Image (cartoon, rainbow, N blue to C red):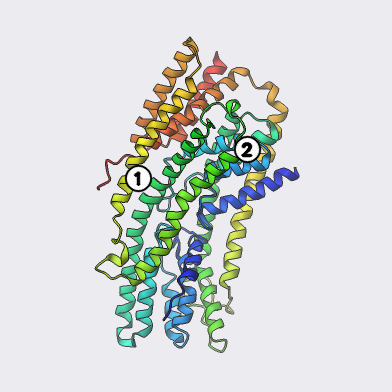
Amino acid sequence: MKIDFIKVFLRTFLLQIFWNYRKMQNIGRFLIVLPILKQLYKDRPDYYKRALIRNLDTFNSNPVMASYSIGAMIKQEEKIAQTEQPKLLSEEKEWRVISGSTANAAASLGDRLFWATLKPFSLLLLIILLYVAQVYVLKEITTIQGKIFIAIVAIIFSLLAYNIPALWIRHKGLKDSYNGTEEDFYGLIKLNWNRIIFMLKRVGQVLTFGIFIYGVYIAFSGESLSADLITKSALLVSFLILSVWSKRLNIPNAYLYIVATIIFSAAALIS
Amino acid sequence: MFELVIACLVLALLEMDTTYLGQFLFSRPACTGAIMGFICGDFFIGLQLGIFTELLFIDFAPIGGVVPPSGAICSGIAVMLAAYFGMPAHISFFIGLLASLAFTRVEKRLRKYRSVILPRIEKYLVNGLLFEADPNQEIQTNQLQTNAGEENQTPIMLSPIKLIMQSFFMEYLVVFFFVLVITALLGPVFFHFKDFIPPTLDVAFSFSYFLVPWIGLSMLFISFSTKQESK
């Protein structure tokens, strides 16, 4: 059967449409594969019913990398459609094994690559582009001048920096896993993901350090040495240390900011 | 008020990108903040609030079943409060952050609600599809697990398109009313009582706001740590 990968690819954007705690992305996955199921089982109503119910099983993966699981499951559905009754149960069992293992592996890789690396990396690119265009967005707002066009271009660039690889992998994942086998883990080990993540993180670290130093220089340049500046700098350093410490304790920085605001406000009101 | 409603409609649409439709990162705070700033008439305030939000939220990730606070809602509410009600960015940012934390509870309730109705949705979906495949076949209402005590009834059917539309609009309306209520309530309150805010309090908020990008950048540096990554 000829699979319309573009149709499946477009439907992958529905993966999280009915996210729930009970079976997570099951309805999304169901909607993605539904046209394939209709095509595969049009002459076998008893198999069709089983396939519909089977595809409502629990599913949870990274929304981009889930393609690596969906392609492999479509391939297995094709196999099930051609299987006769005696072997049906074992092929269905195999489908569940493929679904579980590929979804978990794809989720782990996707969360590390997209949420923990590429998304922050594209934010970093945005800040760098804005600084190159002299839009010092980390400084007090009153100092920002015009240059809306440049800022819009920078935002579009950062969105592309994330979306081009994400869309490519979404599409590639479908094809690779459909054509893949157990030996290449349904296409999941065709790319050296660890190396990609490692390289991006290393470059990200260097760029973040650079923008931090340049940002501090821009923020404090022109200020003369005063008690106010020393106090500001000392508090900044203290909070940087606190933020690293809170990260070790798995306390998100948003809470550190809330606590800092409350403490400063209380101190301001008391004084 | 009309402008505020339009802005809230746009913000709710952007928020849909976070989880339900697409994940193209239009809902990333830097992008949402800039778009909302553009709509509300102050692009750069929006851009800065967006970038600050994203930096502060760098250690929140939607991994597994975790529902992180919505950066889109934080930056969107902050921009609307700043642009429409003259609230200083350092105060509106704080309120936006609290609102996004509150919205996490709303989002969790929505997901729980979907879990409760899931068995019925599954049953109606399968019924509809089986009927579509062969209208003459007998549709069983008890093919899937249903809630305890639910009796077999006349088969109810649900088409996939209807399910997508219903699910999308339910979430959309919840987000829309949430951001509208928060902004429409807190904005005028601030506008009428701003003269009563002690200047020292303003300085305190301003200073904690000044810390945000630097704390965020240090977190960004740590998040790029390669200690646990192998080549």
At horizontal 42% and vertical 77% (from top left) the residue drawn is: A51
The residues bearing labels 1 and 2 have C-alpha atoms spaced at a distance of 30 Å
Q: State the image coordinates of residue B159 (x, y, percent, origin top left).
A: 58, 73
Q: Which mark is residue A86?
A: none
Mark 1 falls on what kind of element?
Answer: helix
Q: Do we see residue B42 in this rendering? A: yes
Q: State the image coordinates of residue B39 (x, y, percent, origin top left).
A: 67, 43
Q: Image height check: is B211 above or below B23?
A: above
Q: Residues within 10 Å of mark 2 (few under 14, many from 20)?
A: many
Q: Amino acid at mark 1?
A: Leu
Q: State the image coordinates of residue A230 (x, y, percent, origin top left).
A: 44, 14
Residue under numbered circle 2: B43
At horizontal 44% and vertical 81% (from top left) the residue drawn is: A40
At horizontal 31% and vertical 78% (from top left) the residue drawn is: A91
Q: Residues within 10 Å of mark 1 (few under 14, many from 20)?
A: some
Q: Amino acid at mark 2?
A: Phe
Q: Quadrant of residue A62?
A: bottom left
Q: State the image coordinates of residue A45 (x, y, percent, origin top left).
A: 46, 86
Q: Which mark is residue A200?
A: 1
What is the chain letter for disc 1?
A
At horizontal 65% and vertical 30% (from top left) the residue drawn is: B87
Using the image as rendered, state which of residue B170 and residue B84 is in the foreground.
B84
What is the chain letter for disc 2?
B
Q: Image height check: is B89 above or below A87?
A: above
Mark 2 falls on what kind of element?
Answer: helix
Q: Image height check: is B171 above or below A4?
A: above
Q: Is residue A134 left or right of residue B226?
A: right
